[in-house]
Image (cartoon, helix red, strand yellow):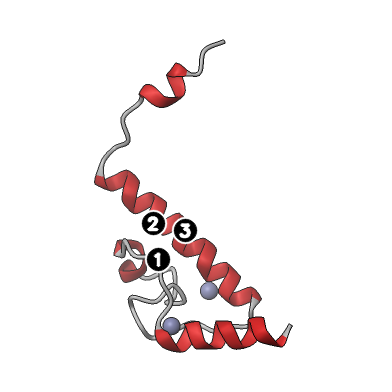
Amino acid sequence: MSLSGLTSGKAGGNAAALLTARTSRLAVHEVGHLLGLRHCVEAKCAMYPPWTPAFAASETVQLCAFCQDKCEQKLEET
Ligand SMILES: [Zn+2]
Ligand SMILES: [Zn+2]
């Protein structure tokens, strides 16, 4: 069995990157919920409601300063 077939396929450029970013963003979002975070009004934030077009369109995976603060507080509590 050869592994070459797994790496020869070219990633679909921007669409693939966007999908990866969206998946990571959703993962961060879920972890945020586990830590007790609520949805955020900041469109750039991973805690922004995931059913919105702005969430799907964003390529960055990050929390806003407010959510990050809350996250760190929760992590320090445990
Ligand atoms: Zn949510
Ligand atoms: Zn936020």
Local packing at callout 2 (Cα closer than 10 Å; few below 14, some 14-19, many 20+) is: some
| Residue 24: mark | 3
Name the N-terminal-most of marks 3 and 1: 3
| Residue 21: mark | 2
Image coordinates for residue 78, horizontal then vertical, percent:
74, 82
Kind of residue at badge 3:
Ser
Q: Quadrant of residue 76?
A: bottom right
73 lies left or right of 62? right
**Residue designated by label 1:** 61
Image coordinates for residue 30, horizontal then vertical, percent:
57, 68
Q: Is mark 3 within 8 Å of ligand 1?
A: no
Decide: marks 1, 2 in contact (CB < 8 A)? Answer: yes
- The secondary structure type at the circle numbered 1 is loop
Local packing at callout 3 (Cα closer than 10 Å; few below 14, some 14-19, many 20+) is: some
Q: Is residue 68 above or below residue 46?
A: below
Q: Is residue 36 above or below residue 21?
A: below
Decide: marks 2, 3 in contact (CB < 8 A)? Answer: yes
Q: Nearer the viewer, residue 33 or 61?
A: 61
- The secondary structure type at the circle numbered 2 is helix
48 lies left or right of 34? left
Kind of residue at badge 2:
Ala
Q: Nearer the viewer, residue 15 or 62?
A: 62
Instruction: Name which residue lies at 44% across and 17% down.
Output: 4
Decide: marks 3, 1 in contact (CB < 8 A)? Answer: yes
